[in-house]
Image: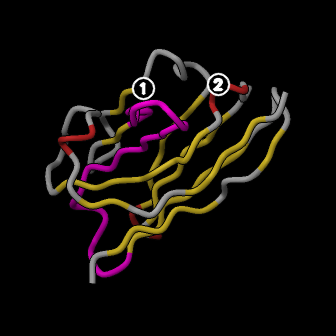
Amino acid sequence: QLQLVESGGELVQPGGSLRLSCAASGFTLATYAIGWFRQAPGKEREGVSCISTSGGISNYADSVKGRFTISRDNAKNTVYLQMNSLKPEDTGIYYCAATRRAWMACRERNYDYWGQGTQVTVSS
């Protein structure tokens, strides 16, 4: 059973930090490119950051560049999103997703397997 489970979302103050985790079960994460996406109410789901199987390629939405860092620990079958200097506009449900490719552009349609999401709320 291929499953992705996000965790780490919570209520934080502006300027604070969170680390989200995406844990995989039922498959070997090392063979999948992984992406983080987010969706706020009334808005389209947005690609936040994606990472290649090796970790050698990653990209970020302009809105998070310099503040967020994606990483992976294939030995733990887990991908992380470190979020610093959080802003209220970062609020949303954060999803991780996987594709059976070494690398795919960070667009929703390129990713096939999705977690249920974790809520991040940045208060103001």
Q: Is residue 36 left or right of residue 11?
A: left
Q: In this view, which residue lies farthest toward the left? A: 101
Q: Quadrant of the N terminus?
A: bottom left
Q: Amino acid at mark 1?
A: Tyr
Q: Amino acid at mark 2?
A: Glu
Secondary structure beneath disc 1? Answer: strand
- Relative to residue 109, is residue 116 depicted above or below? below
Which residue is under mark 1? Answer: 60
Of the numbered discs 2 and 1, the one sitting upstream in the chain is 1
In the rendering, at what x and y percent does residue 75 appear? 42, 69
Disc 1: CA contacts within 10 A as few (<14), some (14-19) or many (>=20): many
Range covered by the magenta-colored residues: 25-49
Q: Is residue 23 left or right of residue 98?
A: right
In the rendering, at what x and y percent does residue 2 appear? 28, 76
In the rendering, at what x and y percent does residue 10 appear? 74, 52
- Relative to residue 31, is residue 69 depicted above or below? above
Which residue is under mark 2? Answer: 89
- Residue under the image location 35 percent in, 32 percent down: 58
Secondary structure beneath disc 2? Answer: helix
Which quadrant of the view contains residue 27? Answer: bottom left
In the rendering, at what x and y percent does residue 21 appear? 55, 58
Disc 2: CA contacts within 10 A as few (<14), some (14-19) or many (>=20): few
- Residue under the image location 42 percent in, 41 percent down: 37
